[in-house]
Image: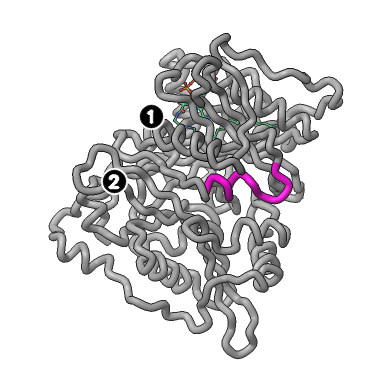
Amino acid sequence: MVDDNNSPGSPDKNRSPNPDGNASPENDAAIDVLARKVQESLVLGKTHKFWETQPVGQFKDIGNTSLAEGPIEQPTPLSEVKQEPYNLPNLYEWITCDIDSEEMCMEVYKLLTNNYVEDDENMFRFNYSKEFLRWALRPPGYFKSWHIGVRVKSSKKLVAFITGVPARIRVRDDIVTMAEINFLCVHKKLRSKRLAPVMIKEVTRRVHLENIWQAAYTAGVVLPTPISTCQYWHRSLNPKKLIDVGFSRLGARMTMSRTIKLYKLPDSTVTPGFRQMELHDVPAVTRLLRNYLSQFAVAVDLDENDVEHWLLPTENVVDSYLVESPETHEITDFCSFYTLPSTVLGNQNYSTLKAAYSYYNVSTKTPLLQLMNDALIVAKRKDYDVFNALDVMQNETFLKELKFGPGDGKLHYYLYNYRLRNPLKPAELGLVLL
Ligand SMILES: CCCCCCCCCCCCCC(=O)SCCNC(=O)CCNC(=O)[C@H](O)C(C)(C)COP(=O)(O)OP(=O)(O)OC[C@H]1O[C@@H](n2cnc3c(N)ncnc32)[C@H](O)[C@@H]1OP(=O)(O)O
């Protein structure tokens, strides 16, 4: 395969300042990578003033297999949880963001659109849509109080944001109610002022108030300590545009027309019984997914309400397809992706990149390769420019063959207040965070 996807143009949360090249995702390699990071930190005199105070795996404990797996700290009585918000610098105030309100949702959208995650070279920035934010922030049992903003007191301008949503996550045999923390953002003009630790402490306090003591999150930066380090892969659907905007490069000895031909996909899907998921499919999809996810060391635990929320197709937010056997009408396979465009920064011809992100996929009868090729075909038909996938679950089995190319940088997975003895391989993760 000609890899024309090696440019720095992947706007993932994978903004590690020192990309790790091609480290293999084996356990030992993962430990090596972490050990190297820690070594670098020591040489640079880099410490984690905030993270060192938190109940997370610490770098000094890497490889110490005598520490037990499970919660690091026990819950405290709710009456001992701090009742008042943490102090902010005087000019700022906390708000709870009512994401149902069109006006509030627009403010959050604008903050993120202008200040959220960029790639290393500042060519692309995530552009989560308002509909996406509403979907991501209002799953079953969500808490409004976990949608937290910081405003300037005088102007009321929103300058920082962090969110949590509840989720059940299974770690080996232990099903743990956690908060999934996402959308941490500080306005560009307020960076490096230690606002992020206050935001994290405040969301932690509000999560504790609901008697929840663990959290899961992903980030492009290395913090103490990843439970796994994954890589994004990119499948060009519109190679000309991707090259024009600098997302990918023309491969060596490749012309534009050969590249277009290389990535061409058929107009229609090939699997008999392949169709969009509908409301009445929720029980069957839930069974299929639960059974599939049970094989991973760490996985999301989804019931029917969760599946309805997270996987029932929502225009421009999440797409789900399944295979219904034409003979037995049994639901045998499932695939899904979510929609996350990126703003193209400083390009004359294009302003956005339309990206699909692989979500949860299950194959029992249709080979995964064929199922995912059908997913690529529908994504292409819906005018996506690129299809992205992490190397989690069984994704490695189709990435190369379906002409995905590796992105640069990594996405690190973390648990708060839950220790794992060793880092996991990406293929041991059954969890995709948005
Ligand atoms: C039980 C319930 C628990 C709930 C909480 C669970 C934990 C949740 C954790 C949050 C999960 C978020 C998941 C996502 O949303 S990941 C997406 C993060 N957002 C972005 O990358 C958007 C663009 N960047 C920014 O808006 C800012 O640079 C941010 C806000 C990221 C940092 O602002 P700033 O650049 O102005 O820095 P500071 O001076 O205020 O603070 C510096 C301290 O902050 C630590 N830092 C930097 N980046 C991250 C990061 N991505 N996760 C955790 N910590 C991070 C850093 O190591 C340092 O601590 P230490 O190294 O000295 O110790």
Q: Estimate how packed mark 1 is, as few (under 14), some (14 to 19) or many (20 or more) residues with alpha carbons within 10 Å.
A: few
Q: Secondary structure at mark 1?
A: loop
Residue at figure coordinates x 51%, y 63% from the top left: 319
Q: Residue furthest bottom?
A: 327
Q: Which span is picked out in magenta?
A: 132-142
Q: Is residue 236 left or right of residue 140?
A: left
Q: Amino acid at mark 2?
A: Ser
Residue at figure coordinates x 70%, y 54% from the top left: 301
**Comes first in the chain, label 2 or label 1:** 1
Q: Quadrant of the N terminus?
A: bottom left
Camera-nearest residue between 113 and 205: 113
**Residue position for label 1:** 17
138 magenta-colored: yes
Query: Number of numbered discs present?
Result: 2
**Disc number for residue 83:** none
Q: Secondary structure at mark 2?
A: loop
The reply to whether residue 81 is visible in this rendering is yes
Residue 321 position within the rendered picture, expressed as x and y whole percent measured from the top left: 53, 70
Q: Estimate how packed mark 2 is, as few (under 14), some (14 to 19) or many (20 or more) residues with alpha carbons within 10 Å.
A: few
**Residue position for label 2:** 351
Residue 85 position within the rendered picture, expressed as x and y whole percent measured from the top left: 69, 19
The reply to whether residue 30 is visible in this rendering is no
Q: Amino acid at mark 1?
A: Pro
Q: Is mark 1 within 8 Å of ligand 1?
A: no
Q: Quadrant of residue 296?
A: bottom right
Residue at figure coordinates x 70%, y 31% from the top left: 417
Camera-nearest residue between 187 and 286: 187
Q: Is residue 434 above or below residue 283?
A: above
